[in-house]
Image: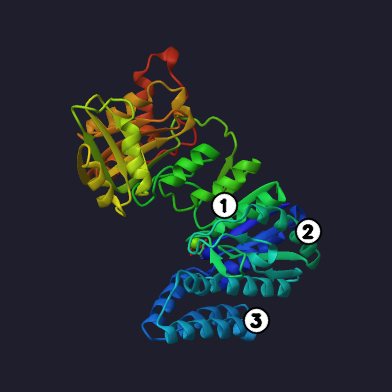
Amino acid sequence: MIVMKFGGTSVGSAGSIRAVVELVRARLRRKPLVVVSALAGVTDALESAARAALRGTISVAAIRRRHVDVLRELDLATTLIDPEFRELDEILRGIQLLGELSPRSLDYVMSFGERLAVRILAAFFVKSGITATAIDAYDLGLVTDSGFGRARPLDRAYDRIAEVVLRERRRGLLIVTGYIGKDERGNVTTLGRNGSDYTAAIIGSSLGVEEIQIWTDVNGVMSADPELIPSARSIAELSFDEASEVAYYGAKVLHPATIQPAVSKNIPVRVLNTHAPTEPGTLIIGRARKSDGPVKAIVCKRGITVVSVVSTRMLMQHGFLAKIFDVFDRQRVVIDLVATSEVSVSCTTDSDENLDAAIRELRGFADARVQGRHAIVAAIGSGIREARDVPARFFGALGRERIGAEMISQGATRTNLSALVRESEVSRAVQALHREFFDDDAACVAAAARPASRRKAPLAGVVRRGRS
Ligand code: ASP
Ligand code: MG
């Protein structure tokens, strides 16, 4: 069995939906279960509709038209979605009437995108000659906590899903909503934006499937943000650790939490492109094959604030670090990098929430300084562990660009070498590092500079590009 998850752009138009049906048809032998996101843009539109209702205006016409257009193009009855729109209208009127939009109502409104998508898709599967049933994930056993906007499955959801799927599969191909669940009281919840990947991983791990396929609109996980690096390429294989690192830095193709349920069951996750299905994409597995170079991706995270705690007196005294982290813990400030010296401890965070309160507390016992507008730039790859020259190349590349690293970190797993730079310099930093570790010319120069006996094969998969 496999799980095939299709994102919003994969079901964004009648054309893509046709492509999806053929992709699934070609894999029927592997007994797929399909997970679907809302049509591209619909979740945002629903959120706006909820906020408009709060301000007194009900406006779902555009959302409705979006779905009706697709239904017409697929030659399906437009009445198919009437029940959902009646229900949506009712809840929006409730929000308007009460003048109140709770996280619970917001989740309820935002759940309609997936609920509409599965119904349209299932109808089109049936029309295309494949017996299929639309099913809302909560009717499949996906019970969550009540953390509206970022709900998490309860432990028993996994067993329950396995049980219900076994029963429901007799009804044909299951087309399941991504992103949503219900809490124990029956309230609709959402798993957080882009949560459909997470749904796919939860279901896949419940069933112990042979593979989870995440169908997107890019050729897998890229070696860098293609907007910054037009020559970025897709990564053939990533270990779960590497993938988590990359996802943590916001690679848009993968929700970080996706990894978790799949990791625990050691289920491979393959990221594929609906619009270029013959591309190999990226395979994410427990232990990835060694890559050709030590570094698989150059990533960055902007909007970083540095907090430096300086104290001459008690810094390295027993319990001092604990005291600092206790403050961050209590104020729920998430820390990324940490660096210590005899006279200072520096930490970075990407949240401003409660940061002021934390600083105030820190100043109660030390001198705390804050600097905003920084960014973390990182090289990811488990090969960093063995390749001894990675730090030299990393800092050499930054140094040649006159970019200073204000903090440096390499964790114990050594799949991540990261540095803190000024936010204004981060694009240049990513470019310099990508050139160093991926660019063919740079690789050849580096290889030529090494003594022949230690020369490694040039980076495979490197496409030669002209320097125009
Ligand atoms: N439709 C939801 C969103 O836009 C979930 C997803 O796309 O995965 O966030
Ligand atoms: Mg999405």
Q: Which residue is mark 1?
A: 272
Disc 2 secondary structure class: helix
Q: Which residue is mark 2?
A: 166
Residue 85 visible? The answer is: yes
Nearer to us: label 3 or label 2: 2
Q: Amino acid at mark 1?
A: Leu
The yes-or-no answer for disc 1 within 8 Å of ligand 2 is: no
Foreground pick, 301 / 358: 358
Query: Answer yes or no: do the residues labelled 3 and 2 have beta carbons within 8 Å?
Result: no
Q: Amino acid at mark 2?
A: Leu
In this rendering, the answer to whether 174 lies above or below 95 is above
The x, y position of residue 454, in whole percent, is: 43, 15
Instruction: Give whichever of discs 3 and 2 has the lower sequence position.
Output: 3
How far is disc 1 from disc 3 in space, using C-alphas?
28 Å
In this rendering, the answer to whether 64 lies above or below 393 is below
Instruction: Give whichever of discs 2 and 1 has the lower sequence position.
Output: 2
Q: Which residue is mark 3?
A: 76
174 left or right of 384 in image? right
The x, y position of residue 83, in whole percent, is: 62, 84
Residue lying at 69% horizontally and 59% vertically, measured from the top left: 33
Residue lying at 30% horizontally and 53% vertically, measured from the top left: 354
Residue 72, located in which quarter of the rendered image? bottom right
Residue lying at 41% horizontally and 38% vertically, measured from the top left: 464
